[in-house]
Amino acid sequence: MAARLLRSLLFVPGNNQRFIDKAKTLNADIVCLDLEDSVPLSEKEKARMLVKNALSNRNEFISDLYVRVNSFDSNLIHDDMKAILCKGLDGIVIPKVNSMDEVTSIAKMLDEFESSNGISNNSIEIIPSIESARGVVNAYSIASASSRVSAIVFGVFDFLHDMGLEYREDGLGYNYARAKIPVDARAAGVYAIDAIWQRVDDIDGLIKDAMVAKELGYKGKSIIHPKHIEPVHKVFLPSKEEIEWAKKVVEALEESIKQGRGAVRVDGKMVDAVHYKRAKAILDAANLIDY
């Protein structure tokens, strides 16, 4: 997999214009405008309109811009996709994914959209969210269902609900699922993003939880408040391997641009402007620590 920063996936309610405006200046690795859990049914249409407007002003956001649509079982996902598929969309988060078929169905819709709108193939990424017993069992096949999948994310509270369990500090009810997901992600060649930390003001608890996630193999965390961005980023600093990759990409692409070319091959894979942006972000993050 190509190295990149996925330390923070910040969910922003799609029905709140003030929060969307604030998200434009936040340095989360991914800002994810939400059409699902944070938006009541009566506000879904309003949220779609606000999200579509935000995507049309993509250049105002400094982070990668994703949208979390509603689940397949909700009967809302097709209206979501119809509303938000447009230029400016970097990716989508699919909640409550139970099988690879859900991912392949979405990937097909994205293929058709990109083809009919002159957008480069595989430009829009997919992050499936694993939130059920079936999802945990099928995590590897979900993660490997499409080349569009860049990561899978663990949804701990919906998983516990599916299992009929209560949240416990020691993680007894979800330790197995939490440990399995990054293993499956790694086997599929994608990243794993850990679940949210629900106590917004408990930063020490957040840091401790993020450190556990890092030890399990996660590359970042889902977050629900801007104050969680910096603590999470400090935990999930780039690895030496990611830094070396980033140096090679920046050097190769800058030389390629001097020669009037765009894409170039690095370690046997083609890289372009998107990879350059991600490589620079890795090197900027690496400046926080002494290697």
Image: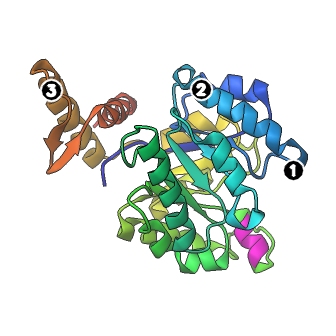
Secondary structure beneath disc 2? Answer: helix
The alpha-carbon separation of the residues under discs 1 and 2 comes to 24 Å
Q: Which residue is mark 2?
A: 56
Amino acid type at circle 1 is Leu
Marked residue nearer the N-terminal end (3 or 1): 1
Kindly identify which residue carries mark 3: 261
User: In the image, 165: left or right of 271?
Assistant: right
Left or right, residue 252 beside residue 112:
left
> Which residue range is magenta in the image?
158-162
Q: Is residue 182 above or below residue 46?
A: below
Q: In this orientation, which residue lies closer to the viewer: 204 or 270?
A: 270
Of helix, strand and loop, which mostly describes the magenta segment?
A: helix
Query: Outermost residue toward the left?
Result: 259
Q: Residue 153 location, x and y as percent?
A: 56, 59
Query: Disc 3 residue type?
Result: Arg
Residue 288 in magenta stretch: no
User: Pointer 1 and pointer 2: residues touching (CB < 8 Å)?
Assistant: no
**Residue at position x 67%, y 73% in the image:** 132
